[in-house]
Amino acid sequence: MLLHKGETLFVQGGTGDLFHVKSGLLKIVRVHEDGSPFLVNIIVEGETIPHHSLLSPMPYHGTAVALVTSEIERISPSEWYEELKRNPSKSMEIALQLQSKLRMMQQRIDQLTEVAPIDKLRRLQEWFHRYIAPHQITDILTQEEIGQLIGLRRETVNRLLRSQAER
């Protein structure tokens, strides 16, 4: 299936299929009780989501939205879990995928532990370049979303990006 920028793949709290991202980028947004969205994850090409349902089903933790046009393969949960029972090597494949995602998230945590705001932004830009090139971060995410990923206010992100552009 083809998902265009801004289209929703699944909604927080729902249940259903798993999905493999053949190409493109998705964001996972968690909606708080007051209705405000918070960007919690970026899903890149090659990932199968939702991660927390790869071994057993659970409701969707957030809402998945396409950041760019993305090709998505729908996976039937019953077929997925049945294949896990029949083929133990599939569990190793899932473990390796989760390990890769964990390492990616550890790098994201490193961004948050930087003290200086400019270092947080620089680390996120490096992470983005490593996993999401050739896209530029500002072409994909809003300043508000960038701030959510690194724990900064949108105004601070705006000031830092302007400062970088001036250099």
Image (cartoon, rainbow, N blue to C red):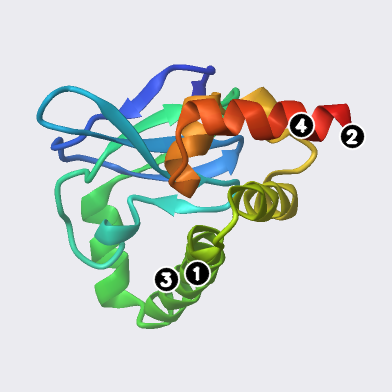
- Nearest to the eye among marks 3 and 4: give it: 4
| Residue at the disc numbered 3 | 94
Report x, y in % for residue 151.
43, 46
Residue depicted at 37% across the width and 77% down the height: 91
Query: Contact, CB < 8 Å: mark 3 with mark 1?
Result: no
Whichever of labels 4 and 1 marks the residue nearer the N terminus, that label is 1
- Judged left or right of residue 17, residue 124 is right
| Residue at the disc numbered 1 | 106
Q: What distance separates the C-alpha of mark 3 from that of mark 1?
A: 18 Å
Q: Decide which of 96, 81 is in the foreground and name it.
A: 96
| Residue at the disc numbered 4 | 163
Q: Decide which of 7, 71 is in the foreground and name it.
A: 7
Query: Contact, CB < 8 Å: mark 2 with mark 4?
Result: yes
- Nearest to the eye among marks 1 and 2: give it: 2
**SS for tag 2?**
loop
Whichever of labels 1 and 2 marks the residue nearer the N terminus, that label is 1
| Residue at the disc numbered 2 | 167
Report x, y in % for residue 46.
58, 52
Q: What distance separates the C-alpha of mark 3 from that of mark 4?
A: 42 Å
Residue depicted at 24% across the width and 63% down the height: 81
**SS for tag 3?**
helix
Q: What distance separates the C-alpha of mark 4 from that of mark 1?
A: 27 Å
Can residue 119 be seen?
yes
Extreme-right residue of the structure: 167
Whichever of labels 3 and 1 marks the residue nearer the N terminus, that label is 3
Q: Amino acid at mark 1?
A: Gln
Extreme-left residue of the structure: 33
Q: What distance separates the C-alpha of mark 2 from that of mark 4?
A: 7 Å
Query: Contact, CB < 8 Å: mark 3 with mark 4?
Result: no
Mark drawn on residue 23: none
